[in-house]
Every structure is written in C-alpha cells, then in structure tokens.
Image (cartoon, grey):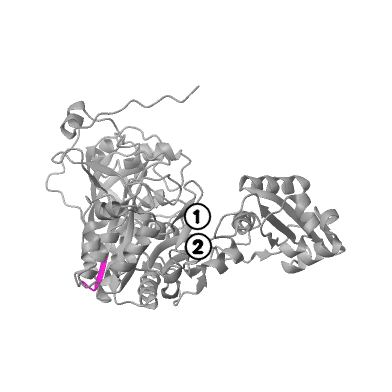
Amino acid sequence: MLDFLGNLKRTHYCGELRPEHEGSQATIMGWVARRRNLGKLIFIDVRDRTGVAQVVFDWKSDPEAHAKAEQLAREYVVAVTGKVVKRQIAPDDISKVQVEVVGTELRILNEAKTPPFPIEDEIDAAEETRLRFRYLDLRRPKPHRNLALRHKIILEIRKTMDEMGFLEVETPMLTRSTPEGARDFLVPSRVHHGQFYALPQSPQIFKQILMIAGLDKYFQIVKCFRDEDQRADRQLEFTQLDLEMSFPRQEDIFHVIEQVMVRACAVAGIKAEAPFPHMLYKDVIRKYGSDKPDLRFGMELHEVTNCFPAEAKEKLQIEGNVFAFAAPGAAGFSRKQLDELTEKAKSLHARGAYFVKVAAEGQTSTVEKLIGAENVKRLADACGAKTGDLVVAVSAKEQIKGTEAAALIAGQLRLQLGEALGVIDKSQWKFLWLTGFPLFEWSESDKTWVSAQHPFTGIVDEDLEKLESAPWEVRSKGYDLVLNGYELGSGSIRIHRQDIQERLFKALGLTEEQLRRRFGFFLDALTYGTPPHGGIALGIDRVVMLLAGEKSIREVIAFAKTTAAQDLMADSPSPVDGDQLDQLGIAIQEKKKAAE
C-alpha cells in the first residue's frame, strides 16, 4: 500500500546533511539508491539531485518503520523522517558522509520496476539504451553535475552580457527559408496552403535588423536548427550564444567573447587568460593542417616539397605540395604500424605517405632510393626531427582549389598520432582566434565558387575590386574562436551597405527574382540607414561539453538525439495521422527503392 505525501515538508536535501545538523530532526525525500538488510538493522541510501544520505531503520527502536523498510527496493520513491546522528565510520570506508538519519517515519510514495541499468556514475550500458530510458539515465549523478554546470555557465554568460550593456531579445522560431549553409527544417502552414515556415539555422537576419532598429547591443541564448548529419559535437537542434553590436571594431567583439569565456571557464574551475592569440587562416592551415587546431602539443607541419626531386615526384605521382611533421619517439614503429598509417592517409585521400626514422646512427626512409640520402636528411632537418622521432610526410591525390590538400591530410594524421603518443597536455586550455578567411570556397559538385560562410559576411575593403574578377582571392571579415581543437563559434563584421550586399548575391549567382523572393525585406531594410555592425555565435553545447570534460555534446543535453537523428525516448520522428496531413495539403510519396 503506497502512502500519500500529504502536508509532509522536506527539511533538507540528501547531500546537504552535515555534522552541524547532528541532533536535529530531518525529513528527506528521494529515490532508494541502495538497500542493505542486516536483520535487525536495515540501511537504505536515499538519493536526490544533491547527493546521497544514509538512513538506518532499527527494529528495536522503531519496529513499524523497520517492517515497512523491508518492502523497499531500488528506485522506490520515499520520504523519511528521523534524527540526524553521527555516523559510525569503518576504517576502510572511503565515503565522505559523516552523518546518517535514524528513521522514525517512512512513507513509500511510489514503487519502481528494476531499471535496465544501474543508476550510478559509471555504467557500461549502450548509449542507445541510455537515451531510450533517458529519464533514468538523467537520475545518475554525472548528468546532474553536467546539467548543473550548464545552468551555471549560461547564468554567468547572461550576467556578463548584461554587465556589458547587451539586451536579450527573442527572435522568431517560425521564419522564412534562407540559404545559410545547411538544409532548413520546414514547417508547413495550415492557413497558407503550399507555403512553409523554416526553423532558424541562426537568427542572422533578425539580429542584423535589430542593429538597423538601433538596439546597439543584442544577445540571445537561442535554439537553432540545421538538418545535417550528426556527430559527437553536432545535433539537429542546438543552443548558441548569439550576439550583435553596432559600430564595432573586430577587437571589440573579441573582447566581449573573451570576457564571456574567461568567466564561463571560471565557473568550471578553469583559469583562462585573455587576450587570446590570433592567427591567419592561411598560416594555421600550413602549420597545423586544420582550421580548428589543437595547440596543446607541437608536431607542427612543414612544407617539404623541395625534398622531392622532379624524377621522384613523377614516379610517386606527386602533384601539389608535400607536408610533413615529426612524431616524437615514434621511430620504433613497426612495419605494420607504418602500413596502418599509410592506409589511414589513403583513406583521407592521400596519394602516398612517406616515412623517415631518425636513429643515433642516421636516418632510414621508405623513399630513400627515390629521393636520395641527402634529401632524406633535409626532410628530417626541415621538421626539426630528433633522435627517436618518426617523420611523416604526405601528398594529396587531388588538389583542392583555394587551400592545401596535403596539409589537411597531414593535420588529421598529426591529431591521431598526438593522441596515440600521449603528447597532448590535457591540463591546458588553448584558445585561438582565426581571421583572414577566404570569402569563397570551391564547390566540387557545383563546379563553382560558393560562400564559405553565410552571405552576409563582410569583405575586406581592399579586396572588393576582386569580387567579380578573382573571387578566390577575396578575404572575408570573418573570424572563428577555437579551443583545444574544437570550433566554439564563428562570426564576422557584416555587410551593411545595400550595394555591396547585392554585388555579393550576384557573385553567388542569385538572380534578381531570387534576391527579392529570399531577401526582399532585408534588402529593403538596408536602405534605411544601416549602421556598420558585426557579431558572433558561440555553441553553448560544445562549450559545456569541453568544460565538463566530456567527449560528446549528448552528455550535456538533457534530451539528446542519436547519431541517426532520433529521440529514442519520445520515439521521434514519427508518422502523423492522415487527417493532419490533409489539413496541411500534404501527401507523402513512397520512398523509391534502390536499384538492384
């Protein structure tokens, strides 16, 4: 028989009981985490979001409560009243709990089935199982800590933005479809048949309009939606800190974000020092082979094309540049390990991988016969290789217009070997601002230059004359913030002049009709005295993931989706009734079967 809570009031949370409460009456409420029946004594651990309290029921002093405690099982919901006493701690007890509650009243508020996995910090249940039973997974202490940290970080961000004079303004969730780099989530309109809203990929146009409206400093902790493939640091719906400023210099926006990140890190007990260093995009690609470099270890890249004579390039079918780096202490790699590295490189579209082992007696190389002993030494010297190091060099199978294909491949190998060799200092927090991005990138599928960021990104003033004639040389006023190999956010100084905005749209191949249909209201707004403005958006999920020490943003999102973009708990997405579709004027086409 279950009990009613009635007017019983909780006096303490489980994790709040301390020696100073000894002798007082306490009422705690929560779930049974553990039960130990020693006959005349029954111990139960009661858990709530603050921690665990031990309760003892003594048959001698309170037989009725003791008898009732015999009915308890894991995850039963209980309310317990009793006296707080000093706990008798065994010598081998590593628990920090110094007091316990001698139960005099027990109310069993609800029963529970046996959970599919233990409600404990560390479990080995499959992630799919955990997400299917998310309401149980979230009872564990670790998700509680992560969500509490997320709350504190967001609260600190709001305080910081308010202190710097920003206004939090909400923007619409139902808006119009605009090209912003990913597929939109479309929402059909019942009232306007055949027309659709789109969920925002970002509040981009709206925050720019707020600057036109004279709000001067805007921010928002906002949900955004992008219909793209899932991965450990990406979800269909995500949360970002979105901000925009009027009349800013690039440095002003950097200063704001640096203050935000320093204070967010402090919430997690991490010391971050501002200002953060800056690097140009072209330099960071050549040095680290990534536009989100991990600066916690060296193994920097070096262009070594001149170590490969023309004859060797022909035999190895090398086109473009060759990039290399020295892996410390890896000269002892076996033939099998080198073959595995070669296969990894080829899976990244390398033409080939070439190795030099540096030993006390000299260097040996897999390409020595082709490039000669002197070039082998030059190759090792160019990478600063020391005795015991392995030099890894790669060339690319196909060149990518506007960037260094071989450097991008070498950058991924650098990360893999850095992790495998244990040279990444996990105690460091290395921020970096990236600037000088190209405005356009080459689309191999469309065989044309497309916008590398969103189409409202500002253009470096002196590059405007190249917009139509040499788009691949045009630099943007965009910038990224990177932390420990993760892109935290991206932003730019915007285009505030209508004439320049229209030129960019036309450079992207948009017709006048497309411009009016997609951006008509925004182009009109630009004609009414738009101030210079700029902003940035930081991924809150990624920030919390890193500060919580997690490897997936699913660990810091209350109700996350799988890599297959499903909410297993809510069984979403799901079919809807036919009459709902009829009201919207929508018919579902059968999926075409793949050709046999």
Q: Main secondary structure of the magenta part?
A: strand
Query: Residue 296: in sight, yes or no?
Result: yes
Q: Nearer the viewer, residue 590 or 472?
A: 472
Residue reaching furthest top?
596
Instruction: List the residue tagged with mark 1.
Output: 442
Secondary structure, mark 2, is: helix
Q: Position of residue 582 (x, y in %)?
A: 18, 29
Report x, y in % for residue 522: 24, 61
Mark 1 to mark 2: distance in Å?
8 Å
Q: Name the residue rendered at 78%, 50% in the picture.
A: 315
Quadrant housing the N terminus: top left
493, above or below 88, in the image = below
Q: Residues within 10 Å of mark 2 (few under 14, many from 20)?
A: some
Region rendered in magenta:
215-219
- Vertical relation: 255 (above or below) 48: below
Q: Nearer the viewer, residue 500 or 370?
A: 500
Mark 1 or mark 2: whose residue is earlier in sequence: 1
Q: Examine the image and state in which quarter residue 129 appears.
A: top left
Q: Is 216 in the magenta?
A: yes
Residue type, mark 1 in image = Trp
In magenta segment, residue 343:
no
Residue located at (24% from left, 59% from top): 24
- How many C-alpha atoms fall within 10 Å of the one at disc 1: few (<14), some, or many (≥20)? some
As shown in the figure, which amino acid type bears the numbered disc 2? Trp
Q: In the depicted view, which residue is nearer to us: 494 or 553?
A: 494
- The residue beneath circle 2 is 472
Q: Quadrant of residue 99?
A: bottom left
Give percent across and percent down for residue 92.
50, 53
- Pointer 1 with pointer 2, Cβ within 8 A: yes
Residue under the image location 46 percent in, 60 percent down = 440
As drawn, the label of residue 248 is none
